[in-house]
């Protein structure tokens, strides 16, 4: 892969907030609906004349639409900078890249921190419970609104990868290719357990106030920070933690108290403290809930393969990472097995990495080369010369 | 433009596999055979490959390939998912050849299997004269470095097929650089002459 010097800022960036009219409510899996849905999104590159080069990138639990731009709050570069950019596998020089904030999120799309028109106050816990299928339905509405009937590809890692699977189940005719990275076809008991720890930390914070914080009041920052700290451990591997920190101390000698003696403690505290600047506690509750409710097989009569029956013509590529214990390789294999059971065109690569789940966001050249090769070949197959 | 010469074993596989069929190549490497089958015979191909580099090369060729190995991952596939399952020069390197062979003909209507023949005269002569494990063109590694942990002869393989109720529909002797030659695997002389052999198998 040629890692160009061209700065990603030079790419055509677009986006904004798409406000759907009263005639286009988001119908929810729970039976409810959201009127006046707003979806915040970013685009990179240009849609070609026959509208065949659009790639939808789906973000993970705490991601957002700023996949390849500096984050407006933290100023840090986009979470997907290794994947999206000039000379990267997803290249705005040839693809029209769309990334939207999920419904339930807190970066501009309708979520629990949005204003409830009925009360004039933030929704809080009055916001309806949403699911990954709801997130994907909102994305499909946005893609249609942008004038795109069929996506060249939908790509995502972690929760984004689960959305890719949901896309394949719900809108197979609107996809040419699908890339599912470091994901699972359902949340395991362990996944739910870690999320429950996070949610209980938030709800134990007195500032959470039953979800009715906001508008000048204190926010449950301590609870949200602890939730992030617990979750962050699941994104790493023991090897990565050991390599990064070992038992290294912050200062010479122990404090004989409960300060952050160890560098790993300090690191986690920093991860927690900086997270609360850019994320909303109620959004964290809603999105983790959506993940816990995700079980693609259960939604298709208990047989995962049945979710993919109509997706036989989609070109799939599934990636996992050896040291990912959050969504381990065995989960990706279950996806691939189900795809094969219906005769779908499935490829699968397990990338050797000791960086844990987070590897999908990091510098992993073997992964990026494989993705690049897959997308190039898919583009050639979509438009035979 | 000179097309690169097609390997004789690939040539023979190309001849055996009916156009337009569904094919799984187990141990597909960088996908050269699958690409050839797709181009020449219009097959709908899938591959299994153990090395990530091989899988990556296949992806860049637009092939659908899964990382995995023959011992463990054939259970990915439903019964009779393929018209042909190809296992080229690999059966002798798997942990459980009997199980793998059974799996090939569970998921495929037919299997194409090629093997080095330990009954070849040079192998026998080497062992007889030198009393050491033979090192030949098709068996290039010393005993302590070879991936070939389950070597057999043409007759051994035919006996295993018989045991598993498999038909040998065709058999070809392979020799380095020369075209494949159809043989009768039951004839003792062929077990002396074939350096390697390729079998087309089906269930009885």
Image: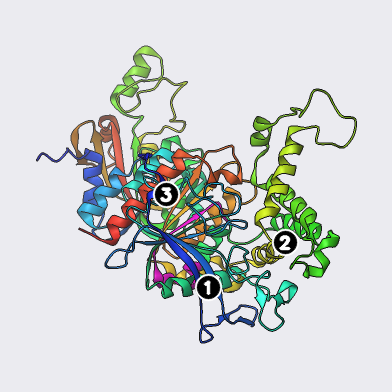
Q: Is residue B7 left or right of residue A271?
A: left
Find disc 1 in the rendering and name its residue. Answer: A138
Question: To which residue does mark 3 refer?
Answer: A9
The reply to whether label 1 and label 3 mark residues of one chain is yes
- Gap in angstroms between the C-alphas marked 2 and 3: 31 Å
* Residue numbers of the magenta segment: A167-183
Q: Chain of mark 3?
A: A
Q: Position of residue B38 (x, y in %)?
A: 26, 54
Query: Which of the pair A248/A110 is nearer the observer?
Result: A110
Instruction: Please report contact status of discs 2 and 3: CB closer than 8 Å, yes or no.
Output: no
| Left or right relative to A76: residue A269 | right
Nearer-the-camera pick, B66 or A181: A181
For the residues labelled 1 and 3, the Cα–Cα distance comes to 27 Å
Q: Which residue is painted at 25% across and 51% down in the image?
A: B37
The x, y position of residue A341, in whole percent, is 47, 63
The chain that hosts pointer 2 is A
Instruction: Give the percent coordinates (x, y) of residue A370.
Output: 41, 45
Mark 1 → mark 2, Cα distance in angstroms: 22 Å
As drawn, the label of residue A281 is 2
Residue neighbourhood size for the residue with mark 3, other residues' Cα within 10 Å, grouped as few (<14), some (14–19), many (≥20): few
Please tell me whether mark 1 sits on a helix, a strand or a loop.
helix
Residue pushed farthest front?
A: A216
Is residue A336 something one can see in this rendering? yes
């Amino acid at each position: 892969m040629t890692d160009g010097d061209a700065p990603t800022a030079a790419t055509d960036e677009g986006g904004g907030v798409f406000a759907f009219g009263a005639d286009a409510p988001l119908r929810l899996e729970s039976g409810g609906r959201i009127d006046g849905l707003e979806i915040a999104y970013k685009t990179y590159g240009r849609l070609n004349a026959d509208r065949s080069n659009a790639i939808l990138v789906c973000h993970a639990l705490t991601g957002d639409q700023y996949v390849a731009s500096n984050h407006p709050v933290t100023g840090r570069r986009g979470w997907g900078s290794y994947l999206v950019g000039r000379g990267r596998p997803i290249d705005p020089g040839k693809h029209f890249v769309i990334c939207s904030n999920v419904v339930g999120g807190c970066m501009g799309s309708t979520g629990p921190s949005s204003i409830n028109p009925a009360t004039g106050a933030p929704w809080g816990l009055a916001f309806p419970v949403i699911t990954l299928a709801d997130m994907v339905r909102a994305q499909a509405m946005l893609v249609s609104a942008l004038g795109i009937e069929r996506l060249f590809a939908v790509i995502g890692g972690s929760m984004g990868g689960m959305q890719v699977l949901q896309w394949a189940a719900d809108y197979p005719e609107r996809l040419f290719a699908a890339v599912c990275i470091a994901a699972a076809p359902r949340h395991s008991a362990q996944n739910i357990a870690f999320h429950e720890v996070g949610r209980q930390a938030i709800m134990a914070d007195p500032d959470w106030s039953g979800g009715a914080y906001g508008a000048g009041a204190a926010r449950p920052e301590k609870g949200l920070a602890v939730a992030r700290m617990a979750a962050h451990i699941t994104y790493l591997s023991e090897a990565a933690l050991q390599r990064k920190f070992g038992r290294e101390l912050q200062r010479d000698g122990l404090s004989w108290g409960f300060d952050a003696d160890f560098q790993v403690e300090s690191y986690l505290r920093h991860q927690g403290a900086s997270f609360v600047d850019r994320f909303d506690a109620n959004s964290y509750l809603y999105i983790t809930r959506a993940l816990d409710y995700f079980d693609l097989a259960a939604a298709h009569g208990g047989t995962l393969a049945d979710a993919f029956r109509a997706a036989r013509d989609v070109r799939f590529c599934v990636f996992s990472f050896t040291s990912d214990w959050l969504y381990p390789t065995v989960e990706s294999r279950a996806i691939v097995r189900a795809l094969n059971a219906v005769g779908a065109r499935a490829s699968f690569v397990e990338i050797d990495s000791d960086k844990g789940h987070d590897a999908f966001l990091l510098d992993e050249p073997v992964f990026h080369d494989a993705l690049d090769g897959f997308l190039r070949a898919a583009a050639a197959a979509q438009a035979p010369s | 433009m000179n097309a690169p010469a097609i390997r004789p074993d690939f040539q023979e596989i190309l001849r055996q596999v009916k156009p337009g069929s569904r094919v799984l190549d187990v141990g597909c490497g960088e996908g050269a055979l699958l690409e050839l089958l797709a181009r020449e015979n219009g097959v709908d191909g899938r591959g299994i490959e153990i090395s990530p580099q091989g899988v990556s090369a296949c992806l860049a060729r637009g092939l659908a390939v899964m990382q995995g190995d023959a011992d463990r991952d054939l259970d990915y596939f439903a019964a009779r998912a393929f018209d042909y399952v190809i296992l080229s020069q690999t059966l002798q390197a798997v942990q459980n050849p009997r199980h793998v062979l059974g799996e090939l003909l569970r998921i495929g209507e037919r299997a194409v299997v090629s093997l080095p023949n330990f009954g070849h005269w040079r192998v026998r002569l080497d062992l007889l004269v030198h009393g050491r494990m033979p090192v030949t063109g098709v068996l290039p590694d010393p005993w302590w470095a070879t991936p070939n942990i389950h070597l057999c002869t043409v007759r051994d393989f035919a006996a295993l097929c018989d045991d598993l109720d498999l038909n040998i529909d065709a058999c070809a002797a392979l020799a380095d650089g020369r075209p494949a030659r159809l043989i009768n695997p039951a004839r003792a002389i062929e077990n002396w002459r074939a350096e390697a052999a390729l079998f087309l198998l089906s269930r009885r």
